[in-house]
Amino acid sequence: MKVLVNISRIFVGILFIISGFIKLNDPLGFSYKLQEYFGSDVLNIEFLIPYALGISVIVVVFEVVLGVFLLIGYKAKFTIWSLLLMIVFFTFLTFYSAYFDKVKDCGCFGDALKLTPWESFTKDIILLVLILILFFGKKYIKPIFSKLPMSIIALLSFIVSLWFGYHVLLHLPAIDFRAYAIGKNIQEQMAVPEDAQKPILEYTWTFNVNGEEQEFVTNGSYPKVDGEYVGVETKTIDEGYIPPIQDFSIESDEEDLTTQFLEEEKLLIVAMYNLNNGESDGVVKLKSFTDKAIKNGYTVIGLTSSGADDKARIKQENKLNFDFFLCDEKVIKTIVRANPGIVILNKGTVVNKVHWNDLDDIKL
């Protein structure tokens, strides 16, 4: 039992620290995932949506701190109970998502590692078993330092975690795991290779044969059946290759301009997923910055999911010398974790990306 407890202690502690740090690297992204869970079509607790960011920071800081507490053996009873309650809640959440097909990606490891709902549930079941081993063998969890060093390490883990979360919120994630990271080419991320695995579909055909409905399963071909066709249902067995970027577009009211803009050598994008929610201090900075960019030969455009009236209003109020084009809100949130944020492209390759707080760091 002592060996099992120590193995579980190391595995659970390290996993919680890694999982928590990845989400702490991008608390805004985790808050978007929480908003998805809080929505009416999942848990239907929409009153929590305005507090998603605060909940996100609290949860991920707590996750990292619990991992540290477990490894050093600090306040074992509090730590084990906290881990148990947390994993029971997460196990329920991932099972609910998987069984009812509500959320496609749990966000357990942010954008660093995508897990399907059933993979997430399996991971939580394994963690639940390991934490139960810790729960029943907590007498074997001994502190590895004396009281003072333990208290200092525990306090430092909390302070450093909180500082790091605050820092990335004011700037951008320290490590960008997304398909729009600096150095990535958008066209390449959207392309499907010729030898890519194709989707595997299963078709269940229903026919009326001699007054009785019968089902026939094929991989897509129409079955040779002597009967009257009733209907067909399609089931995806394997989705095949899915490109990292699927929904990126730059559209005007009349046409799709994606290809045109992705051929620009010096394209500066002002990304604001919602013009009404843009941070006012950041919006104020846009005028002088974009004017300077235009003078230096950049093509400057805005990307937003807001409507025509909001586009015209913000352009007039701030005397902006560029136009906003339409893009999906979720895509813009994925491109850059700021509202507004700045992205610079060279023929579709991301060469720079900053939070509005760091506009002065960009050399045009």
Image (tube, helix red, strand yellow):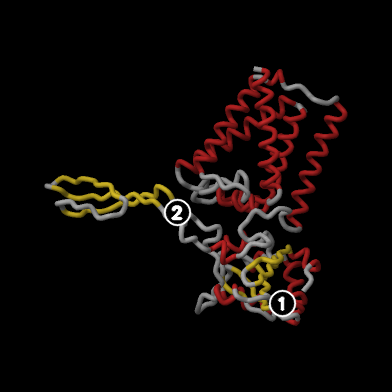
Q: Quadrant of residue 7?
A: top right
Disc number for residue 318: 1
Residue mark closest to the camera, 1 vs 2: 2
Please identify the residue farthest to the right as the structure is shown.
Answer: 148
Which quarter of the image is occupied by the C terminus? bottom right
- Element assignment for label 1: loop
Which quarter of the image is occupied by the N terminus? top right
Q: Quadrant of residue 277?
A: bottom right
Left or right: where does residue 252 sit relative to residue 270?
A: left
Q: Identify which residue is drawn at 16% across, 54% down.
A: 228
Q: Earlier in the sequence, mark 1 or mark 2?
A: 2
361 shown above or below 177: below
The residue that mark 2 highlights is: 197
Q: Quadrant of residue 283?
A: bottom right
Task: Estimate how packed mark 1 is, as few (under 14), some (14 to 19) or many (20 or more) residues with alpha carbons within 10 Å.
Answer: few
Residue nearer the viewer, 219 or 102: 219
Report the number of numbered marks: 2
71 shown above or below 1: below
Q: Is the Cβ of the residue at disc 1 closer than 8 Å to that at disc 2?
A: no
Type of amino acid under label 1:
Asn
Task: Estimate how packed mark 2 is, as few (under 14), some (14 to 19) or many (20 or more) residues with alpha carbons within 10 Å.
Answer: few
> Real-space Cα distance between discs 1 and 2?
48 Å
Q: Where is residue 304 drawn, in percent x and y?
A: 60, 69
- Element assignment for label 2: loop
Left or right: where does residue 57 sit relative to residue 37?
A: right
Q: Where is residue 286 drawn, in percent x and y?
A: 74, 73
Q: Identify which residue is drawn at 49% across, 60% down.
A: 193
Q: Where is residue 13 drawn, in percent x and y?
A: 69, 33
Type of amino acid under label 2:
Gln
Q: Identify which residue is drawn at 28% across, 53% down.
A: 232
